[in-house]
Image: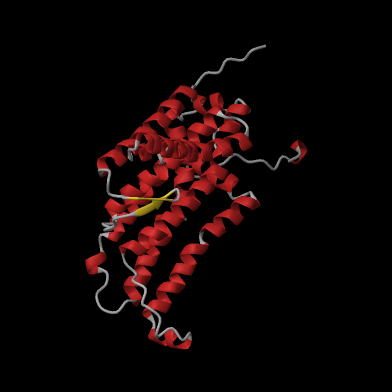
Amino acid sequence: MAVYKRNYRAYAGPATPMSWRWLAITRFGLGEVFASRNTVVLFVLCLVPPLLSAFLIYVVNSDTVRALLNLRGAPPLSINNRFFLGLLEVQGWLALFLTAWVGPSLISPDLTNNALPLYLSRPVSRARYLAGKLLTLALLLSAVTWAPLLLLVGVQAATAPGRWLAPNLFLVPGIFLGACIWIAVLSLLALAVSAWVRWRIVAIGLTLAVVFIPAGFGGVVSAVLRTKWGLLLNIPYVITRVWIQLLRVTISNTRINGELVNALDFPAAAAWTVLVAICALSMLLLNKRIQARQVVRG
């Protein structure tokens, strides 16, 4: 705006309470995320499996549609906890790739442009700054994990014959808690990588490498030492073990990295310990990197 026009007026509306101003970080973070066309395309692709699953649930529970599609003689598909476990695994993988794409752009630009001291010089603490960035990823990943899955539970409850929801009500807290655990692990991991790696391409590769490389190393350890404890380095296996417990799935064998293993060989407590350790290590790295001071070398 040109100065000579003198049309500028100070903001006279209600001010946001000081304790909630950190949410501006989340609001602008989401705006920057969806400003990228590639991110929007990836986000839409993440919603394709739930849409297909909703159509599948409708077909399974509708005799008319099954007759039109000539599926009356086909073996029935059970929409149960095992079905939602498989769908949660699919959405979990998609959430991983979405995190790897979006995560590196959250903290790294603030460090590269020396903006972090400016953030922390305002009435925003380090905890609230990280909470704003974390909430950005949490809202984005929630929209592709537990939110569509809970909608599918509602669709199944509304279209299934009889009282389906009452004996399967445990799916609601199970899906929500299981997805939130995975969101917390991915978000803290992505923020830690973004804080320490400034190059976006390298950060994307490192985020994926943190998940896949230990899994391969754990497979080697299991093969050499003839033990299955090495699979605790396989983060997808670990989170799957937690999901099996939360969704009350009775399963004897599962395929991990092409190998058929017993998914219940490990106590769930071991899987929980690994996830807590990953979150704690990520928070330690963030605490080390996010500082209110910065050394400028001239």
Q: Is residue 264 left or right of residue 292?
A: left
Along the line of sight, which residue is nearer the eye, 244 or 23?
244
| Picture quadrant where residue 172 is located | bottom left
Across and down, in percent, residue 181 comes to 36, 45
Quadrant in which the C terminus is drawn: top right
Asked if 165 appears above or below 192 in the picture, the reply is below
Asked if 127 appears above or below 1 in the picture, the reply is above
| Picture quadrant where residue 247 is located | bottom left
Residue at horizontal 63 percent and vertical 37 percent from the top = 201
What colour scheme does the image use? secondary structure
Along the line of sight, which residue is nearer the eye, 134 or 19?
134
Query: Which residue, as the protein is rendered here, is positioned at the far left?
Result: 167
Is residue 222 visible in the rendered image? The answer is: yes
Across and down, in percent, residue 121 comes to 51, 24
Along the line of sight, which residue is nearer the eye, 94 or 21?
94
Quadrant in which the N terminus is drawn: top right
Residue at horizontal 57 percent and vertical 35 percent from the top = 203
Is residue 28 visible in the rendered image? The answer is: no
Across and down, in percent, residue 269 comes to 25, 40
Across and down, in percent, residue 55 comes to 46, 73
Asked if 234 appears above or below 44 in the picture, the reply is above
Along the line of sight, which residue is nearer the eye, 285 or 84?
84
| Picture quadrant where residue 157 is located | bottom left
Q: Is residue 97 left or right of residue 263?
A: right
Query: Which residue, as the protein is rendered here, is positioned at the far top?
Result: 298
